[in-house]
Amino acid sequence: MLAVGSPVHVRKLRPGGKQDYAWDGVVLRCDASGIVLRAEFNVDLVERDFATFRRGDVFVEFYYWEPNGTGISARNYNVFQVSSADGSLKGWYCNLGLPAHLDAQTGDMSYIDLALDVWVNPDGSFVVLDEDELEELLVEHPELTAAARQGQRDLLELAHNKRLPRWNT
């Protein structure tokens, strides 16, 4: 496991292993269940229908490990709590994806993204994104279907029940 304050380089991969995005974060918590990182948005401006992201926005990222004989099913998603630079909560960006893998020696972490995303507003309303992309991905990679469907159900249940992870900054 990594100590609080340790740097981590995150790589979001496509099925097949090609890198889609990469960024750096710092460990807020790391234990047997997963890791929580703090990262700052490093693009000047990204406007979407559901939210606007700006350089300096703070992302608290919750990743979960593959279970190791614990009897707990895998969490095939990760969740980013997004706040503006002044600390105002914008919402949660939730990614359908396979559990993260960490190389504790190098601080490199990666996960396979499964296309579908969910944006949850602070009031609990949410929008499901990229459903068509998920369906296309599963046609190309049918071996990922069980994990994707379980993660999709779990993620939507978290959003419906307003049980997303929260880090008090």
Image (cartoon, helix red, strand yellow):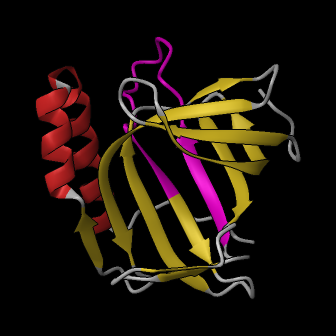
Q: Is residue 93 covered in magenta? A: no
Numbered circles on residues, count: 0
**Residue 162: x percent and y percent?**
36, 69
- With respect to residue 99, does 113 lie above or below? below
Q: What segment is highlighted magenta in the picture?
A: 58-79
**Residue 123: x percent and y percent?**
39, 86
- With respect to residue 133, does 113 lie above or below? above
**Residue 37: x percent and y percent?**
70, 51
Q: What residue appears at the point 47 percent right and 21 percent down from the top-left corner? A: 67
Q: Is residue 68 covered in magenta? A: yes
- The quarter of the picture where the N terminus appears is top right
- With respect to residue 69, does 50 lie above or below? below
Point out the residue furthest to the top here.
69
Q: What residue appears at the point 75 percent right and 51 percent down from the top-left corner? A: 25
| In the image: residue 33, left or right of residue 14 | right
| In the image: residue 19, left or right of residue 71 | right
- The quarter of the picture where the C terminus appears is bottom right
**Residue 20: x percent and y percent?**
48, 43
| In the image: residue 95, left or right of residue 44 | left
Q: What residue appears at the point 33 percent right and 84 percent down from the top-left corner? A: 49
User: In the picture, residue 140 is in which quadrant?
Assistant: top left
Q: What residue appears at the point 35 percent right and 29 percent down from the top-left corner? A: 15
User: In the picture, residue 151 is in which quadrant?
Assistant: top left
Between 157 and 12, the one nearer to me in the picture: 12
